[in-house]
Image (cartoon, rainbow, N blue to C red):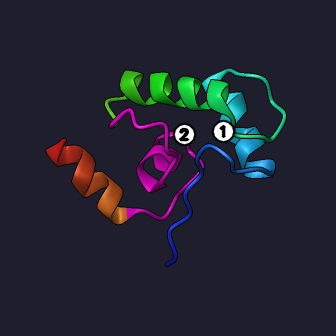
Amino acid sequence: MSETIYHKGSRGGMVAQIQKIVGTKTDGIFGSITEQFVKLYQANHNLIPDGIVGKLTLAEMGLLHDCEDCLIFQQHW
């Protein structure tokens, strides 16, 4: 499985979904404001607040459903 990561500079429909979940403007462009909102979301959900939406953050958001190692990591975090 290839890992999909969204970060500052990413664009598209998945970015728009992420923006909707974190509560910022939904324009499909991952900029500085989206990054700040992602960090806040991550901190509030006991994730590392790095502003990068990888498989752990996607799983927490309900956007990634096949992630066994996410559960293992979260148990140790």
Q: Amino acid at mark 1?
A: Ile
- Which of the 4 quarters of the picture holds residue 26? top right
Q: Which residue is most to the right?
A: 27
Chief secondary structure of the magenta portion: loop
Residue depth check, mark 2 versus mark 1: number of the one nearer the observer: 1
| Quadrant including the C terminus | top left
Q: Amino acid at mark 2?
A: Met
The location of residue 11, given as percent across then percent down, is 76, 50
Residues 47 and 52: in front is 52
The answer to whether residue 48 is left or right of residue 67 is: left
Neighbours of disc 2 within 10 Å: few (<14), some (14-19), many (20+)? some
Residue 61: which numbered mark, if any?
A: 2
In the image, what residue occupies the spot 50% across and 68% down? 3
- Which of the 4 quarters of the picture holds residue 74? top left
* Residue 64 is covered by the magenta coloring: yes
In the image, what residue occupies the spot 15% across and 46% down? 76
- Residue hosting label 1: 18
In the rendered view, tell whether residue 32 sits above or below residue 52. Answer: above
Q: Are marks 2 and 1 in contact (CB under 8 Å)?
A: yes
The answer to whether residue 33 is left or right of residue 64 is: right
In the image, what residue occupies the spot 52% across and 58% down? 65
Q: Which residue is most to the bottom?
A: 1
Neighbours of disc 1 within 10 Å: few (<14), some (14-19), many (20+)? many
CA distance for labels 2 and 1? 8 Å
The location of residue 75, given as percent across then percent down, is 19, 46
What secondary structure is marked by label 1? Answer: helix
| Magenta-tinted stretch | 48-67
**Which is nearer the N-term, disc 2 or disc 1?**
1
In the image, what residue occupies the spot 59% across and 51% down? 6
What secondary structure is marked by label 2? Answer: loop
